[in-house]
Image (cartoon, rainbow, N blue to C red):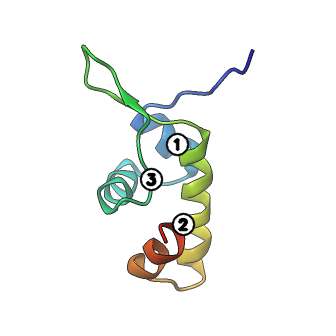
Amino acid sequence: MDLKTIYLLKDLARASGHSVYTVEYYLKEGLISEFGRGPSTGYRYFDDRAVRRLARVRGMRKKGFSIDQIKKRMNP
C-alpha cells in the first residue's frame, strides 16, 4: 500500500521553508498545484510533489531566475 503524505497549505509552507503568502503566490502563478479540495471545508490538499517543486523553485530563485523564467523551465 502506497501511503501519501497530505499537506494543508500551512503544512506545505512549513515543510518547504516558505511562508504561506509565498506558497499562495506560487500557486497563483501555476508553479505548484493542489491535488484536491476538502468538499465540506474547501481546504486545498497538496502532496510531496508540491514540496519537491517548491524546493526546485527555491533553488532557481537563489540562482537569480525570475518567476517567468522558472515558469518556462518548469511548465514547458
Question: Residue 3: x percent and y percent?
Answer: 68, 20
> Tag on residue 14?
1
Which residue position is annotated with label 3?
Answer: 32
Rendering quarter of residue 40? top left
Category of crowding for the residue at label 2, using alpha-carbon neighbours closer than 10 angstroms: few (below 14), some (14–19), many (at least 20): many
Rendering quarter of residue 29? bottom left
21 or 37: which is nearer to us? Answer: 37
Total number of numbered discs in the rendering? 3
In the displayed structure image, the side of residue 12 where residue 56 appears, left or right: right
49 or 22: which is nearer to us? Answer: 49
Q: Residue furthest front?
A: 76
Q: Comparing marks 2 and 3, which lies closer to the viewer?
A: 3
Helix, strand or loop for disc 2: helix
Q: Comparing marks 1 and 2, which lies closer to the viewer?
A: 2
In the displayed structure image, the side of residue 1 where residue 61 appears, left or right: left
Helix, strand or loop for disc 1: helix
Q: Tell me which amino acid carries mark 2.
A: Val
